[in-house]
Image (cartoon, rainbow, N blue to C red):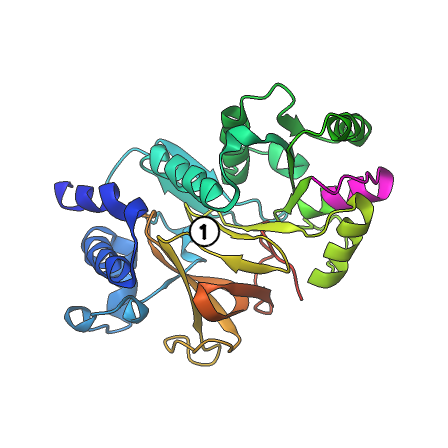
């Protein structure tokens, strides 16, 4: 597919609205032509493909399609298949990744954009439920970032909170630069059992109670973690199996995206209508790194956009599956 190689080479260099729009339109036509599932969906909506001239007009594929269809643009043998966690009895989503280097480029460049080089941190991942299954894109990302940190203390922890607590206390004494990345319920367990005053640490929650604990509103959750660890703010990661890119919050639950990713808000009563800033609705995501899958996805998350492409997650549609990544109802 030589016609799309130019997109692959420039998505991470997008620097303007026009750049994004041009690339999104090029990807839309490529995926409409080469992604059978997406093409059928677009045709079902009776979309006038030739009249689309802005990314906000591009149809977004409901994320549920990843559960029952092979959503790929072109025919290829995937280098990786990422699967969603889901709870028992629920159908998992599958993301067939043609080029895992694209994923690595997306998450390393995004990390650097928000936090600087991974080499500057001791990165500790507290992701027990994700480590206990195969196919987690979050575990893959954490593992690569841990490798890039090149520090012996970096690594995964499963359930040994006592050992983790001992390590954090030691790193605090050494005045080390630490990032603790954790699934929400495990961070709460650690906070209750081994609170550690470590205000210099970057504490990042990836969401997900996984049915282990009752859901908490955003402010309540963050206040518990702030009090337990003495940190001024809680960082958050927003990503999902069906994407190759992530958004991050550097405090107060307000997320920002890298330049190759955009959030749009759709009307819950008219899913084809896009709402202005400040209005609550369903979250649509454009992820230009999803070249060989689908870059235009309608999620089951609810949220609102603020100025400068910042956005907030407010919950989920009723009766939708509970997804493992960031699901704070606030």
Residue 247 location in percent, x, y?
Answer: 49, 52
At 38% across and 37% down in the image, what residue appears?
A: 105
Residue 204 location in percent, x, y?
Answer: 63, 45
At 55% across and 28% down in the image, what residue appears?
A: 146
Lateral position of residue 105 relative to residue 160, left or right: left
In the image, residue 57 sits, relative to residue 216, either above or below, namely below
Q: Residue furthest right?
A: 193
At 58% across and 58% down in the image, what residue appears?
A: 321
Residue 199 is covered by the magenta coloring: yes
At 64% across and 28% down in the image, what residue appears?
A: 156
Whether residue 273 is visible, yes or no, is yes
- Where's the C terminus, which quadrant? bottom right
Of residue 73 and residue 202, the one placed in the foreground of this image is 202
Label 1 element class = helix
Of residue 97 and residue 234, the one placed in the foreground of this image is 234
Residue 153 is covered by the magenta coloring: no
Whether residue 74 is visible, yes or no, is no
Lateral position of residue 126 relative to residue 271, left or right: right
In the image, residue 240 sits, relative to residue 328, either above or below, namely above
Name the residue that disc number 1 marks: 67
Specify start and end residues of the magenta stretch as a single range: 187-200
Mark 1: few/some/many CA within 10 Å (<14, 14-19, 20+): some
Residue 325 location in percent, x, y?
Answer: 58, 50
Q: Residue furthest bottom?
A: 269
């Amino acid at each position: 597919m030589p016609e799309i190689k130019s997109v692959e080479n420039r998505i991470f260099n997008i620097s303007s609205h026009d750049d994004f729009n041009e690339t999104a339109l090029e990807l839309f036509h490529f995926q409409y032509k080469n992604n059978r599932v997406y093409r059928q969906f677009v045709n079902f909506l009776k979309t006038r493909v030739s009249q689309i001239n802005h990314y906000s007009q591009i149809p977004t594929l409901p994320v549920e399609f990843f559960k029952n269809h092979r959503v790929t643009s072109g025919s290829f043998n995937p280098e990786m298949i990422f699967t969603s966690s889901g709870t028992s009895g629920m159908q998992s989503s599958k993301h067939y990744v043609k080029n895992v280097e694209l994923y690595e480029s997306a998450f390393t460049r995004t990390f650097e954009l928000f936090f600087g080089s991974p080499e500057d941190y001791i990165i500790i991942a507290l992701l027990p439920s994700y480590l206990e299954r195969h196919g987690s894109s979050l575990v893959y990302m954490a593992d690569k970032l841990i490798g890039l940190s090149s520090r012996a203390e970096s690594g995964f922890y499963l359930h040994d909170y006592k050992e983790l607590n001992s390590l954090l206390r030691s790193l605090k004494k050494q005045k080390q630069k630490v990032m603790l990345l954790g699934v929400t319920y495990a961070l709460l367990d650690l906070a209750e059992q081994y609170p550690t005053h470590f205000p210099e640490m970057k504490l990042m929650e990836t969401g997900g109670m996984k049915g282990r604990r009752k859901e908490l509103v955003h402010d309540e959750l963050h206040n518990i973690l702030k009090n337990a660890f003495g940190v001024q703010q809680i960082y958050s990661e927003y990503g999902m199996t069906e994407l190759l890119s992530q958004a991050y919050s550097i405090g107060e639950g307000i997320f920002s995206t890298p330049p190759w990713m955009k959030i749009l808000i759709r009307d819950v009563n008219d899913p084809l209508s896009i709402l202005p800033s400040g209005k609550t609705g369903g979250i649509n995501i454009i992820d230009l790194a999803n070249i060989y899958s689908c870059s235009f996805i309608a999620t089951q998350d609810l949220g609102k956009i603020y100025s400068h492409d910042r956005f907030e997650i407010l919950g989920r549609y009723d009766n939708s599956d509970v997804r493992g990544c960031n699901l704070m109802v606030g």
